[in-house]
Amino acid sequence: MKKISLDKKGICEYQQNRDPYLLIDYASEIIPGKSAKGYKDLKSDEWFFKVHWKNDPNMPGMLQIEAIVQTGALAILTLPGNKGKFLYLISANNLKFYKKVIPGDTLAIKTKLINYKRGIGEYYGEAIVKNKIVSSVDFKLLLPDEIKKYSK
């Protein structure tokens, strides 16, 4: 399939998260049904830096995972007929956090859709800062509209 790139406005056309919970600024390469890459430029005024931690601001690990999941979702949502649909996280395993992510970092995200069947996508994703993996996860997403076809 043809590669797609999306700015923030384009991302919002495909998926349901919105600021401040939209954790990707740009999807640099989406191959529908295969993979998605993107990034988040972490400005010092991000809402989570103000509350996590007061004298040592850093991006919470679970928000790093959420950014990975949001990026990965685009690999399914860009398939024909899926634009704007809901996807739900149903599992996250093998979460790993290697390095603190701080204001000024660019969180580069790479995801691969390993398997997609009957509305369930299995993924591997990682977040990278300065060419070093800072977090990674195996996860599954569920597309309820597709599942309904098989539950009659």
Image (cartoon, rainbow, N blue to C red):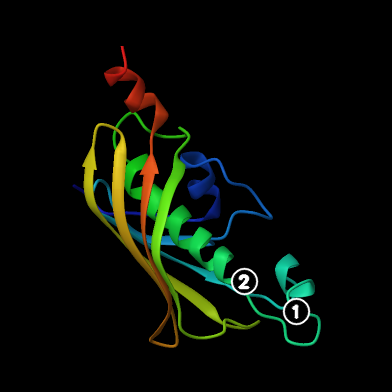
- Vertical position of residue 76 compared to residue 19: above or below: above
Residue 92 image point, x, y percent: 42, 56
**102 shown above or below 115:** below
- Distance Cα–Cα, label 1 vs label 2: 9 Å
In-image side of 102 versus 133 (left or right):
right
Q: Residue 4 placed where, x, y %?
A: 32, 52
Q: Disc 1 vs disc 2: Cβ atoms closer than 8 Å?
A: no
> Mark number for residue 151?
none
Q: Residue at x 49, y 56 (%)?
A: 7
Q: What is the residue that sits farthest to the top in this orientation?
A: 152
Q: Amino acid at mark 2?
A: Pro
Q: Position of residue 138 (x, y in %)?
A: 34, 61
Q: Which residue is mark 2?
A: 60
120 or 18: nearer the eye?
Answer: 120
Q: Which residue lies at the image location 44% right of the left edge and 39% below the top edge? A: 87
From the viewer's perspective, is 69 left or right of 151?
A: right
